[in-house]
Amino acid sequence: MLRRLTLRFNSLSKRRNHSTCAHSNNQTLKSSQTTLSVRPPLLVMTHRSPRIAEFLVCHGTRLSSTVASSSVSTATTLRNSPSLDPSTFKTLSFYRFHTLAKEELGPWREQLLDDLKQWHIVGRIYLSTEGINAQLSCPEKYVDALRTYCSTVIKPRLGDTLMDLNLGTEHGQRAFRALHLVADGLDPTSYNLSNQPSHLSPAEWHKKLAEYKAKHGKDPVLIDMRNQYESHIGYFEGATRPDVDTFRGSIKAMNEIVKDVPRNQEVFMYCTGGIRCSKAGAILQSASGFETVHLVEGGVTAYGRWIQGQEEKSLFKGKNFTFDARLGETITDEVFGKCHLCGQPSSQYQNCTHASCNLLMLCCSSCSTQFLNTCGRLKCYDTVHRYRTQTHEHFKPDGPIMIDGVRAYVKEGEKNMRSDIERVVVGKSGVMCEHKYNRRIRAFEVLGEPGQVLEEWAKAGRELPPTTATI
């Protein structure tokens, strides 16, 4: 069981309350969870209200991969601060597998909360007996201060080893919805995390892959350790991309891929930021007996940042899926996906803004605008359209509006990001929609083939919505 301690302070209501951390829309933690809320001074923390800032430190017994969530974190305190421009936030991450005593986690969590609030950082840090995993948005002016803090305070507690801050390739508004620790179901006694794979710099990774076939006369064993929705919009050329939805599924697929590979042959693997490959590579080396497993230090995120400054052609094509409000950052211009509504080329993901649906789907900017960022099904569109219409005259983008007990609000950081219409979320997550509320459900299972949703409008005798925002 993963136990999360959320420190919360609502500067508006000053009320103490209890809540449960939101799950991912694609991958969920099935074990029971407990969220405790207390109220520290000054620091604003939550993941549920769009009017208050967030900083969350979690602790548990396992450290594993991270996944997306449907919730949104915003920072009114930062928005109202004249000294902080919310458009200058940098998305960054770092992690380290290192054995920590369970009794260390609580005190260290409190220290991190106390120390990092001075830099107005939002995001998530996960502590467990296996190590630390951080996904943050930091004001650009404080990135150097955070880097120094990591080197002088965090690094010594992790055996004097910690990757440098892994900056994303695209920045801007505070990007975070939420990131959650996943229980991968793996037996921790079956592998040795200290048997780490080879961590190649992006330059070393690029050189090895580019020259491998010429040197060895065959293609490298290259495994994409991400989920299918991630690899669907971008990947390294020649990679095997398992059709999986969980990290546990990736491990199972990995073992199947390499079952006939000689143990003295090099294996290459990659993921978004490197943490999944650190664990998967350790499993291959310690449990499966492979001599050399390579990963790219900092994952696709670091490679994408590096290749932008190089003359060489990128070996990664398309977009790197990100677990924040952007849902992806462009590495190259190739587009591999199709809009689930109209079938036009698109590599932009969005979640349906009817919170009871929350379906993750590819959607072009035209359909995103036309269908109010919903999945396009009649119930979802009508729900969002109705609330937008009722709230238009007094709609405030900096806070929620209650109508008949239902909250409607703009997801900060997503306004005008992909279309010319504000992204409004309506309803409650976890409430049954027309499809089963399953966070791993795939868009085609609900929407069918591209164009089928539009046919449903015709069958119902409905005209399609206007192609431009009218509300």
Image (tube, rainbow, N blue to C red):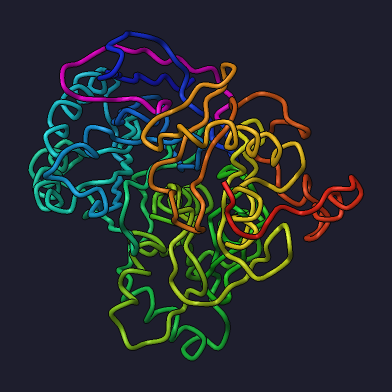
Does 268 appear above or below 7? below
Does 104 appear above or below 437? above
Residue 96: x and y in percent read 29, 44
**Which residue occupies the extreme top position in the image?**
16
Q: Does residue 286 appear in the picture of this structure?
A: yes
Residue 37 falls inside the magenta stretch: yes
**Which residue occupies the extreme front position in the image?**
393
Instruction: Tell me the chief SS of the magenta region.
Output: loop
Residue 285: x and y in percent read 45, 54
Q: Is residue 409 left or right of residue 432?
A: left
- At horizontal 65% and vertical 42% (from top left) the residue drawn is 359
Residue 61: x and y in percent read 40, 25
Q: Is residue 41 left or right of residue 383?
A: left
Q: Is residue 372 left or right of residue 65?
A: right
Could you say which is closer to the camera, residue 329 or residue 197?
Answer: 329
- At horizontal 89% and vertical 45% (from top left) the residue drawn is 460
Range of residues picked out in magenta: 29-49
**Which residue occupies the extreme bottom position in the image?**
214
The quarter of the picture where residue 441 lies is: top right
Residue 113 falls inside the magenta stretch: no
Does 74 appear above or below 240? above
Residue 254: x and y in percent read 60, 55
Does 154 appear above or below 204? above
Could you say which is closer to the camera, residue 340 or residue 23?
Answer: 340
Q: Is residue 12 left or right of residue 265?
A: left
Q: Does residue 252 appear in the picture of this structure?
A: no
- At horizontal 43% and vertical 62% (from top left) the residue drawn is 329
- At horizontal 41% and vertical 16% (from top left) the residue drawn is 35
Could you say which is closer to the camera, residue 340 or residue 57?
Answer: 340
